Amino acid sequence: WDQVVFVLPAFEVRMGTRLPGTKAELLQLWGRGDARPFYGALCPRCQAPTDYGRWWALPPSSHLRVAYETPWRDPWEPFYVGPAHHVPPFDERFLQYGFNRISQACELHMAGFRLLGLGG
C-alpha cells in the first residue's frame, strides 16, 4: 500500500447552498444543478479522469472501499489521500496557479503510484 493513493471526487456547491452530508444529498444537489465537479466549468479535463460517472454509478454502501483504478493522464489534478512518508512532497516553490498540482500528480505517476477511486 506504500505506492497507492486514494482518489476522492471533489465538488463545487453553489454559494448559499447547504453542504450535503451524504452522497444521496449530494446527488439531489447535482440533479438540481447546485453541485458540479470541481473546476467543472473552468477546466473539465483537469478532473475528468476522476470518472464522476463511474463514481455516481457505484451502489450505496456504509463502508469505504476501493471501487476502481484510474491511470493518470495529463492534465489531471486528483484530490487524494496517501501515505505521507511515500508520496512525493509538494513543491512549495509553486505560487498561486500554474502546474503545481499537475506536477505533483505527474510525479506520483512516474514513481509508479496506483490511483484508486473510493466508493461508499
Image (spheres, rainbow, N blue to C red):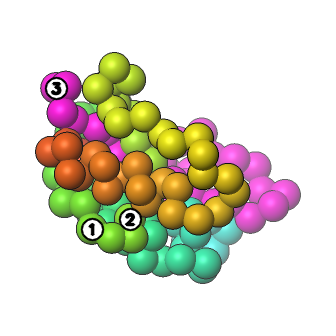
Residue 93: image x %, image y %? 60, 46
Find disc 2 in the rendering and name its residue: 76
Span of residues in magenta:
1-28
Q: Quadrant of the C terminus?
A: top left
Q: Are marks 3 and 1 in contact (CB under 8 Å)?
A: no
Query: Under tag 3, what secondary structure?
Result: loop
The amino acid type, in three-letter code, at marker 1 is Arg
Give me the residue at 53% from left, 77% from top: 43
Give me the residue at 19% from left, 60% from top: 71
Badge 3: few (under 14), some or many (20 or more) residues near its Cα, within 10 Å? few
Q: Which mark is residue 73?
A: 1
The amino acid type, in three-letter code, at marker 3 is Trp
Residue 88: image x %, image y %? 35, 36
Assess whether residue 15 is covered by the magenta stretch: yes
Badge 2: few (under 14), some or many (20 or more) residues near its Cα, within 10 Å? many
Find disc 3 in the rendering and name its residue: 1
The residues bearing labels 2 and 1 have C-alpha atoms spaced at a distance of: 6 Å
Q: Residue furthest top?
A: 85
Quarter of the figure with residue 38: bottom right
